[in-house]
Image (tube, helix red, strand yellow):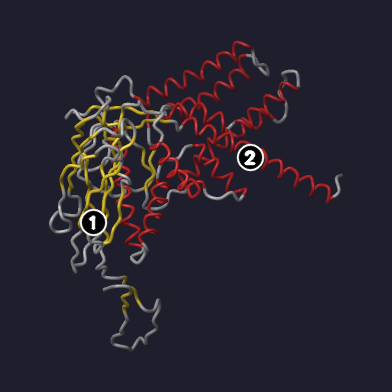
Amino acid sequence: LIPKWESTVYFACLVYLFLGVSIIADRFMAAIEVITSQEKEVKIKKKNGEVQVIYVRIWNETVSNLTLMALGSSAPEILLSVIEICGKNFEAGDLGPGTIVGSAAFNLFVIIGICVLVVPEGQVRRIKHLSVFLITASWSVFAYLWMYLILAVFTPGVVELWEALITFIFFPIIVVCAYMADTKIFFKKFLKKRYKAAGYLKKADKELELGNHKEEVTYNLELEENDVSEFERHRLDYVETIKEIRKRHPNIDMKQLEEMAQLEVLNKGPKSRAFYRMQATRQLTGSGNVIKKSKVERRMSTEDQQLDGETYPAHVQRFFFNPGHYTVMENVGTFPITVSRIGGDINAVVSVDYHTVDGTAVAVEDYVPASGTLIFRSGETHKQVPITIIDDDIFEEDEHFTIELTNLKVMSSSSPVEPVLVDPKVATVMVLDDDHSGVFHFELQTKDVSESCEYAEVKVVRDSGE
């Protein structure tokens, strides 16, 4: 038998090597995340003739999850099995097949069970694409039956070449079936996606819910393209997040409010399989939160992408708000909204119209309506729109309104220039009320009174109000 101290050292070495493998797998998954998150520029012409530039992912989410994501997350088991079977003259060992089957069984029973169990009471978790889920779930169950047939019925204890080839062919068939279900190739003309005035996407296929239904937030919105509406959906989500944080922390500083809102919006967004794997590894090794580390990096990379003209045609000039979100106090008075242009011939003279649009904030009552034309003269890359907020002494909820860019025109240019509006072409102004009524709470959490007392006074305290 191994002495106790040697077994302890052996166990510590195993843990150390395990962390080493997990860090290598983390790097591999990070590379896959970079590949699958690549985007391309797409120009869309709306019904009014306006050209809008949007960014869509090159990789289909379903295809990437079934191919690169699955390969990356299962790489240690696959490599272990391949190395073992090659080293044993193509005879199954004790470790390789067990790790793959055990991992698959763990995913099928334990992971699914935990996902159902941990849904908090009163909240909702939805399967985003039910049709894709049904196809992948059916193929997953069939995989167990197929393995049993080839190992216990057709050729017991032996995997023939024809069985291996058929098993391999099943994989692209699964991917194609899932992709067809995700893109709805045969049902597009019947299942057209549109945004209703309620602000949520009308589901082309049903969503499976876990838990009770949560009230939807309503918006005045009418969009047709799912890709075009992604930025608008993010903008509205950002506004609602600021309102929620403002209610929880009425005295929070504006800078902290925006940082908390950005972090919360990022946390709410959909994550890939690679993200959760990297997050778990980083927490085990003390590397910190991926979201918190990437927030500033993402902001800097976005600025770099905006300043990088190599990915765009030389004659294309992009106009946008910089930034797309503004959070101000009600007593701010007048503040500037910045409109920028990049790319193309900077010496060209281009005009762009702007106008304010009511949200929960109403023109004349909450802000001074503004509209006009900005003229970018030769060499100018930034112009500012003055916006005035009307201050009052009435307590009201935090409100917002938007400013839109329209009608680009080239007034003069020495070389061909194609001006286009890119996101954010709508700027959101969040107006925080400075007449907050305060936070009300009981002075004491508990109060003891005699049963013979006819009545008792409970003191209510108001903090930070006006």
Label 1: element kind: strand
Q: Is residue 379 left or right of residue 104?
A: left
* Foreground of the two, 261 or 317: 317
Badge 2 vs badge 1, beta-carbon distance below 8 Å: no
* Foreground of the two, 274 or 257: 257
Q: How many marks?
A: 2
User: Which one is earlier in the sequence, the residue at label 2 or at label 1?
Assistant: 2
Residue under the point 58% across and 22% down: 147
Whether 440 is drawn above or below 374: the answer is: below
Q: Is residue 103 left or right of residue 188?
A: right
The kind of residue tagged 2 is: Ser
Determine which of the numbered discs, if any, sits on residue 399 in the image: 1
**Relative image position of residue 390 (x, y in whole percent):** 18, 61
**Relative image position of residue 174 (x, y in whole percent):** 47, 21
Whether 384 is drawn above or below 255: the answer is: above
Whether 123 is drawn above or below 187: the answer is: below
Farthest left residue?
A: 364
Q: Which quarter of the rendering shows the C terminus?
A: bottom left
**Relative image position of residue 454 (x, y in whole percent):** 28, 87
Q: Which residue is mark 2?
A: 22
The kind of residue tagged 1 is: Glu
Q: Quadrant of residue 125?
A: top left
**Relative image position of residue 257 (x, y in whole percent):** 37, 58
Residue under the point 37% across and 27% down: 182
Q: Which quarter of the rendering shows the N terminus?
A: top right
